[in-house]
Image (cartoon, helix red, strand yellow):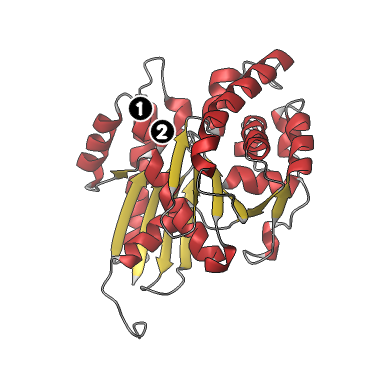
Amino acid sequence: MRLGVLDIGSNTVHLLVVDAHRGARPLPAYSHKEELRLTEYLDARNELSAEGIERLGAFVEEALRLAEDKGVEDFLAFATSAVREAANGEQVLARIDERCGVDIDVLSGRDEARLTFLAVRRWFGWSAGRLLVFDIGGGSLEIAAGVDEEPDVAVSLPLGAGRLTRDWFTADPPPADEVRALRRHVRAEIARTVRDVVRNGESTCAVATSKTFKQLARVAGAAPSSEGVYASRSLSRQDLAHWAGKLTTMDTATRAALPGVSPGRAAQLAAGALVADAAMDLFEVDRLEVCPWALREGVILRRLDQLPGRETPPA
């Protein structure tokens, strides 16, 4: 089956087309994305602006056309924190549905954490033991832990890199007092979750997903994307602590010049690094393994699990 998945994230809107059937690894066939950064279109009333709605609608229209051109048989669309938390989120989705004829599923923060955990579990397998998974998005931080495909605990915190950059930093690079204030805030928020997350035991494998972690790992010396998804990538607490301090002293242009950092994400990488550093420190994680699969793959895998079983793939 050829499946199209439209991921409306806080930073990026992404159409991914995969060839897949139940029990098999989804094979990417086509990808189209845009760094729309919906959080930047939230006004003082926390509503998505008319310009933001128009740009989102235009991308959804384009995605549907491309999906048809690529022979998609089944189409899924989901949105995360930017739409979920916008004061006019329901109205936005109604307008998109009226314009494009597509029903967009809004995932809760807990569902984001659960589906990301599923993707990580399928990637690393049962031999990884008890997993602890972190995902930093544009609007939220997801944390999940467990020994099965369904985590024992799944938490979502409003600590996304884009959100924090917008709400806490007033200059580029941010002043030292703003960095300290954000650092205190992030650590207080994460510290409240530690006991619940670890109550069922220590993890045997700690994993990071998302663009923020991938870029931090690359800056710290991990293999570039050109080496493929199967190259082993990790991030140590020592390296991250070093870069978390250094990135906050750089302006956006300097960060964008670092290896693996995209210009569209450079502005929020400092805030993301503070979140990542706090998570590793408070959960006492010495090293994170970086997983190429995340929420989008979790949504795909869950959809495939719902299909009738097939003994052999279609011809």
Q: Amino acid at mark 1?
A: Ala
Position of the C terminus, as image quadrant, is bottom left
Answer above or below: position of 77 versus 110.
below
Q: Are marks 1 and 2 in contact (CB under 8 Å)?
A: yes
Q: Return the residue at label 2.
A: 82
**Of residues 282 and 109, which is closer to you in this image?**
282
| Residue sitting farthest toward the front | 200
Q: Secondary structure at mark 2?
A: helix
Q: Position of residue 18 (x, y in %)?
A: 42, 66
Q: Is residue 66 visible?
A: no
Left-right relation of 286 to 138: right
Position of the N terminus, as image quadrant, is bottom left
Left-right relation of 136 to 16: right
Mark 2: give few (<14), some (14-19) or many (20+) Cα within 10 Å.
many
Answer above or below: position of 135 versus 192.
below
Q: Position of residue 254 (x, y in %)?
A: 76, 33
Q: Is residue 252 visible?
A: yes
Answer above or below: position of 308 versus 196.
below
Mark 1: give few (<14), some (14-19) or many (20+) Cα within 10 Å.
many
Q: Position of residue 234 (x, y in %)?
A: 70, 54
Residue 162 falls in image quadrant: top right
Residue at the location (25% across, 32% down)? 90
Q: Return the residue at label 1.
A: 86
Q: Position of residue 179 (x, y in %)?
A: 68, 20
